[in-house]
Amino acid sequence: MGVERALPGFVTSQLSTAVNWARKFSLFQYPFVTACCGMEYMATACNRYDISRFGAEIPRFSPRQADLLWVVGTVNHKLAPFLARIYDQVSDPKWVISFGVCASTGGFYDNYATVQGIDKIVPVDVYIPGCPPRPEQVLDALVMLQEKIQREDWDEHYDKAAMMDTPA
């Protein structure tokens, strides 16, 4: 299920394999940065770690131009509706990375004001543990997301979209 050689000079592949390969190396990210994990997020984009090697170089500051939502830091209940709105505006197909222990589980903020994990608001594809997570962990999570994107069933995604568009 990859690229096969048919005849000398010809290469065949499935459309979903080619599309998923292109998607995994062209991630347009939208950073939703709310707390101290933002410094580690910025460090990952610097030349020492160079997130651009993985196709996620330039952050987009409009969710309509992005397909990867990074939730970086603590999310409180006042911010939750805004996060949900931003997630709805991200273009399809969309992916979410929960960056740090505060975004993943609420961290050490075990109180009424903090959302105890953003998966209560938006679906999460990859969780990054740590307070704050190291840039190496961030790159590992990005590689995990790329592997998930490569395995996605492209036809199933568009069948679901077609069913949602048809009037009942």
Image (cartoon, helix red, strand yellow):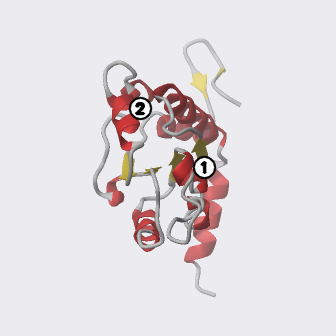
Q: Earlier in the sequence, mark 2 or mark 1?
A: 2
* Mark toward the viewer: 2 or 1: 1
Give coordinates of residue 12: x percent, y percent. Answer: 61, 27
Query: Residue tagged by mark 2?
Result: 55
Give coordinates of residue 62: x percent, y percent. Answer: 29, 57
Q: Quadrant of residue 109?
A: bottom right
Q: Is residue 12 positioned above or below 60 on the image?
A: above
Left or right: 76, with 128 as reference point: left
Identity of the residue furthest to the bottom in this view:
168
> How many numbered circles does the render carry?
2
Query: Residue tagged by mark 1?
Result: 125
Is residue 89 or residue 47 the one in the foreground?
47
Give coordinates of residue 91: x percent, y percent. Answer: 42, 59
Is residue 58 or residue 122 the one in the foreground?
122
Please tell me which residue is depicted at 50% across the width and 54% down the height of the picture.
Answer: 94
Q: CA distance from mark 2 to mark 1?
A: 18 Å
Amino acid type, label 2:
Gly
Amino acid type, label 1:
Asp
